[in-house]
Image: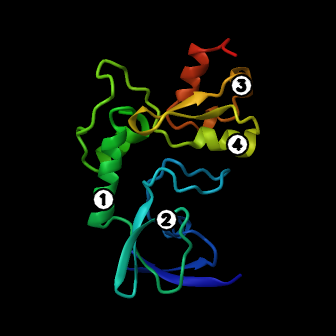
Amino acid sequence: MKTVTLKINGLEVSAREGASVLDAARAAGFDIPTLCSHEELEPAGVCRFCMVEITRGTKSRLVASCVYPVENGLEVQTESDRVKKIRRMLIELLLPVAPSGPIGALAKRYGVEKSRFELDNPGQAPANCSLCGLCVRYCEQIGGGDAVGFLGRGVSRKVALMPDKGDECVFCRKCYSICNSGRFVEMAEVFPDQP
């Protein structure tokens, strides 16, 4: 198996060719946060929390480490000022809808105490769904039911049961264990008999 050599936070690291920067960083002991990463699913780069700053030559840019392949000579910073700024913004965007669970833990880690953003309807309770898409992708790739999807856009986006697929979802329950916010357990309790 061919290997490549790169630097992560100044440490020289070897990784197998074709591995992602996220895999190489984790193997080297660096903690890069993710919401949408799961060993049973193909990487998707959806949540953007795994952003890192890469440098090749004199040019640097931000990339999603879960979908960016390792390269010889690549330099990676997992906690640069640019990376932290992006993560804080992502936390602020999600904090109003998911103040506890993984978002709450990330807010504490990155020193985000409140968000500049508000819910569409200030009186509504937070859904506590981080919109990571794990349930949607799991249903698509492994469950085979396509019973779960996204509804709406932007701050109004939410995970929803597809029409006429509610029974499949409630009785299948394969994705419940990967939901990092417990949202599907709530949905099953609230809508146990919905078609």
How far is the residue under mark 2 from the one under mark 3?
A: 34 Å
Q: Is residue 107 above or below residue 53?
A: above
- Whichever of callouts 2 and 3 sits on the residue coming sooner in the sequence is 2
Q: Position of residue 184 (x, y in %)?
A: 58, 27
Mark 1 → mark 2, Cα distance in angstroms: 14 Å
Q: Quadrant of the N terminus?
A: bottom right
Q: What SS does tag 4 mark? A: helix
Q: Amino acid at mark 2?
A: Ser
Residue type at mark 3: give it: Lys
Label 3 to label 4: alpha-carbon separation: 13 Å
Q: Which residue is mark 1?
A: 84
Q: Residues within 10 Å of mark 3 (few under 14, many from 20)?
A: some
- The spot of residue 47 in percent (x, y) is 47, 50
Q: Which residue is mark 4?
A: 140
Q: Which residue is mark 3?
A: 165
Label 3 or label 1, whichever comes before in sequence order: 1
Amino acid identity at mark 4:
Glu
